[in-house]
Image (tube, helix red, strand yellow):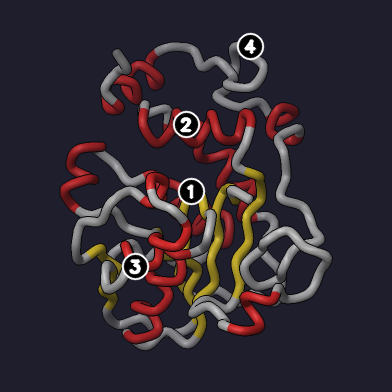
Amino acid sequence: MPAHPLLAALTEAVLPQRCIACGHFGAALHSHCLAALPRAEEPRCPVCWTPGPGGPCTRCLEEPPAFEALRARFRFEGDVRRALLEAKFRGKTALLAPLAVAAADVLPAAWHIDAVVPVPLHRGRQRQRGYNQAALIAKTVARRLDCPLAAGLLRRSRATAPQAGLPAAERATNLRDAFEAHDAVGEVLLIDDVTTTGATFEAAARALKHAGANSVYALAIARED
């Protein structure tokens, strides 16, 4: 039976760390192992980051998303997938910091960010899990970018079914009116661990713009293509 995430986090803090990629002790994820992880490299749509020949994809041209652009450093496969699932469901949160730093380093210089905002969990789910992995990632990204962390700017107003268990066509419907924001200004950077269709970022960006944000950008550790 899997360990409770909080117990796993406590164990992780006390015992020597073993790299999830190579299995050797010394770090949750060694730098050379981090460098070898599968990257979400171009050519991709510069808006939603879908793989393609380059330039905006047909979907973004026909129906532009609420966010200005999205980036993800890695592909959601192999050791990246394993690391994010271990962090999310088994409390191995030490894996998130090196992944978050790597993700922050791919942001375009043209993105001028005023606030970093994590995609929130519903309070019931966060109480059950004990933490929000997106908030932990956002804290590292904000520090890396030297930007304010505005964790309370956005909240999840209702519980929703897990996105991972839904067909692509149902993901947007599942998140309709699921977020509320207040006093959002300037250029906001949304943070999540994984993105697939971009539906979560879309719903959150709509709430932030409704609350006054000028522009909303999105950053995920990994993209599931």
Mark 3: which amino acid? Thr
Q: Are marks 3 and 1 in contact (CB under 8 Å)?
A: no
Q: Locate residue 62: give its quadrant.
A: bottom right
- The residue lying at 72 percent from left, 68 percent from top is 45
Task: From the viewer's perspective, tell me whether residue 201 is left or right of residue 6.
Answer: right
| Residue identified by numbered label 2 | 94
Mark 4: which amino acid? His
The disc, 4 or 3, on the residue closer to the chain's N-terminal end is 4
Q: Residues within 10 Å of mark 4 (few under 14, many from 20)?
A: few
| Residue identified by numbered label 1 | 193
| Residue identified by numbered label 3 | 173
Q: Nearer the viewer, mark 3 or mark 2?
A: 3
Q: Are marks 4 and 3 in contact (CB under 8 Å)?
A: no
Mark 1: which amino acid? Asp
Q: Nearer the viewer, mark 4 or mark 3?
A: 3
| Residue identified by numbered label 4 | 24
- The residue lying at 16 percent from left, 48 percent from top is 124
Residue 205: % across, % down: 43, 75
Q: Residues within 10 Å of mark 1 (few under 14, many from 20)?
A: many
Q: Are marks 1 and 2 in contact (CB under 8 Å)?
A: no
Circle 2 SS class: helix
Q: Is residue 122 placed above or below 29 in the rendered structure?
A: below
Distance from disc 3 to disc 1, alpha carbons, whole Å, reads: 21 Å
Task: From the viewer's perspective, tell me whether residue 179 is left or right of residue 49.
Answer: left
- The residue lying at 53 percent from left, 66 percent from top is 218
